[in-house]
Amino acid sequence: MKIARFAHRDSSVGDVSFGIVEGLDEHDEPTPSTQISELDGHPFGTTDLTGVVFPFSDVRLLAPVIPSKIIAVGRNYAAHIEEMGSTVPDEPMIFLKPSTSIIGPGDTIRLPASSSEVDHEAELAVVIGRLCRNVPVETALDVVLGYTCSNDVSARDHQRSDGQWGRAKGFDTFCPLGPWIATNVDPADLRITCSVGDDLRQDSTTALLLRDVATLVSWISGVMTLLPGDVILTGTPAGVGRITAGDVVQVSIDGIGTLENPVDHG
């Protein structure tokens, strides 16, 4: 099941709903027959339908969730660690991105004037489905609602100069999420790619995560309480690279779909 957060194109900004996306093609891309069946409320519980169905062309997709917190994991693919000249951490390395950094499908990544080295980082994002704390690894996937595509946009020059990653990864628009939440995928071995225009930059699989989704959810829930809608970014594979104004970035993950965002000056 694919769960989207959307606004009707003719509605006010505040008229936002969740819905189940139906009629995607074999690549999880919309077709002329794709539609969204509106949910009665939010997806963190029962998924009752209102009976209202929107043609996909009549809605505007939003970021699938606005979480209380985004917990990002650094250095979780060996090849990316090597390309950055870093070392494998003894325990998961986590940092927080603000919810104000989130944008949705089609929204613009804005380059801050203070940085001249902004990179893309394609990642599998985990959406938590219920309140949890100290979750055992064996049952960690039970607290997951589903998965979506993400881009952990990063200002490398600030990352180097600041000695920590809060500013480098916390700018407005630096966390694209979408296009929807896929609830029926196995995160163990999903192909993940990132293209900038026609240039394929990242091409890997979640099978190469040093710490898998269940391990991350369990470990992070031992640090902090996770709330419904919270997002865990699982780390990026090798191939991160620079983005500039005029680029269009596409993050695609098998079983989920494609998240596309243009890039422009702030």
Image (cartoon, helix red, strand yellow):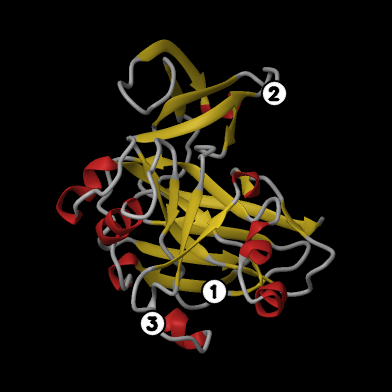
Q: What number is the disc on residue 88?
A: 3
Q: Residue at x 55, y 28 (%)?
A: 6
Which residue lies under the disc numbered 1?
Answer: 201
Q: Which quadrant, please, contains the N terminus?
A: top left
Q: What number is the disc on residue 13?
A: 2
Amino acid found under the numbered disc labelled 1: Arg
Amino acid found under the numbered disc labelled 3: Val
**Callout 3 crowding tier (Cα within 10 Å): few <14, some 14–19, many ≥20:** some
Amino acid found under the numbered disc labelled 2: Val
**Do the numbered discs 1 and 2 sit on residues whose CB atoms are within 8 Å?**
no
Q: Residue at x 61, y 71 (%)?
A: 164
Residues under labels 1 and 3: Cα distance? 22 Å
**Do the numbered discs 3 and 2 sit on residues whose CB atoms are within 8 Å?**
no
**Do the numbered discs 1 and 3 sit on residues whose CB atoms are within 8 Å?**
no
Of the residues under marks 3 and 2, which one precedes in the sequence?
2
- The location of residue 150, given as percent across then percent down, is 51, 54
Hey, which quadrant is residue 220 in on the image? bottom left
Residues under labels 3 and 2: Cα distance? 44 Å
* Nearest to viewer (mark 1 / mark 3): 3
Q: Residue at x 30, y 68 (%)?
A: 211
In the picture, measured across the screen, residue 239 lies left or right of residue 225, that is right
* Nearest to viewer (mark 3 / mark 2): 3
Q: Residue at x 52, y 58 (%)?
A: 251
Residue ranking furthest to the left: 138
